[in-house]
Amino acid sequence: MKLLIIIGTLLILLLVGVPIGFGFALAGSAGAAAAGLPASAIAGAPYFAVAAIPLLAIPFFILAGELMNRGKLIDRLVDLADSLLSWLRGRLGHVTIVSSAFLGAMTGSSVATVAAIGSSVGDRMVRGGYNRGYVGALVASSGLLGVLIPPSIPLIVYGATVGVSVAELFLATLVPGALMTIAFMIVHAIRVRSVLTPGMAGSAEISGGFSTDAFKGLGRRVLRSLPALVMPVIILGCIYSGITTATEAAAIAGLYALLVIVIGRLLPVKQIPKAFYQAAIVSGAILVVIAFTSIFNKVLTLMRVPQDVAEFTVALTDNPVVFLLCVNLLLFIVGMFMETNAAVLLMAPLLFPAAMEFGIDPVHFGIILVTNIELGLITPPLAANIFVALKVMKTNLPQVMRHIWPFLLAAVAVLMIITFVPELTLWWK
């Protein structure tokens, strides 16, 4: 009964439009009152939730991505990808996907990736003859790579919540991220003929083919893109060489991005404070959600809900395959209705104990959880990536939804592979 009060209060608050963080705080407080818990039991939860050192990585990575984006380095990456992928059929779509992967390696944010890629490569695809609704679907789907490819903000949140190494989580996403990228490229290659406007059948987008002309000036493009290309190398190199922690690497990434912008004069000096301000606004919003969600999670923990869920799940089935199927279905539904970081904060503490009972590696489980929840970014009703793509590409929901399903099915297929072939995630162990 007490659990129903908490969940019911949360759903009502979210449905009437209460901000996510405040909804969790109010629902948690209602649950604490129903359970007879003293206010002192939950008063310190928000502070201790955001005081976790791994969470310092979030504002630094967001700042680095904001500076790189405002400095137009994404345009240089797009030009480089355009040269390298010019021989493929449906070149511009492949450029969109690969550029999204590059940008994801700088920002760790899916929505930011959609906005940046949509306003650059997306417009180029429309001018190249692609259906506007299809471009919106491709841009929204490719934005998932911003979450999956390290650095990933939801993975930082997961690691800080359940006490798993963020560095190991980043390493574990490399193969799944590559698989998702390849899956989207395959879908695009299959669909390219059907999504080009009539009269484009003989275009280079259809024919593809190797041409040495495309590689003219490649060296210059590589040099222009080098500052952006080096950043993920610095981040991952510092982490996996043992020189720094993930949090310290995030700080280095922020400082590196600032130096690149200042030394290269890529952004007027008066615009730099605006980048810091925007990064602070986005970081603050994420940390507020984390802080207030901790009240909700603290109440559930004191009521032994995670332990009860684990015991119920183990009693229901002793088969880890069945457990993972059930978890995937549950997470998919949750991701449809909740913001990604909030969903991670809610579901990780609930499901983690049960996963440990089944002997599932905590790193592997983290990749499953985050990959699954992120599918909600392209699955209505929440579907944040789709709505950002609608705005950027100036299209409508029915047109985008008509083209989103092949990419969603490909993402689900990759999720199943990640779930039941743990070696792809834990290849480094």
Image (cartoon, rainbow, N blue to C red):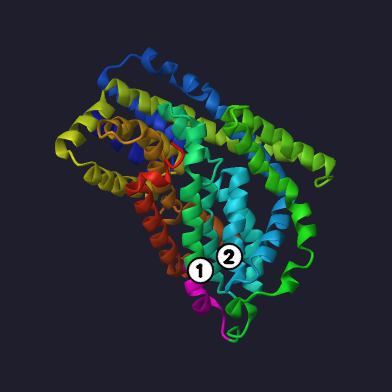
Image coords of residue 395 (percent x, y)? 55, 67
Residues rendered magenta in the picture: 187-198
The reply to whether residue 283 is visible in this rendering is: yes
Dot 1 amino acid type: His
Count of numbered circles in the view = 2
Image coords of residue 192 (percent x, y)? 52, 75
Examine the image and state in which quarter residue 306 appears: top left
User: Disc 1 marks which residue?
Assistant: 188
What is the chief secondary structure element of the magenta stretch? helix
On screen, residue 90 versus residue 259, left or right, reads left
User: Disc 2 marks which residue?
Assistant: 94
Image coords of residue 209 (percent x, y)? 62, 76
| Residue at the image point whose x is 37% and y is 33% from the top | 362
Viewer-proximal residue among 276 and 325: 325
The reply to whether residue 71 is visible in this rendering is: no
Examine the image and state in which quarter residue 24 appears: top left
| Residue at the image point whose x is 55% and y is 50% from the top | 111
Q: Is mark 1 on a helix, strand or loop?
A: helix
Tell which circle, 1 or 2, labels the residue nearer the N-terminal end: 2
Q: Do the residues labelled 1 and 2 touch (CB within 8 Å)?
A: yes
Q: In this view, does 223 lie above or below 57?
A: below
Dot 2 amino acid type: His
Viewer-proximal residue among 80 and 52: 80
The answer to whether residue 97 is magenta is no
On screen, residue 290 versus residue 100, left or right, reads left
On screen, residue 131 versus residue 300, left or right, reads right
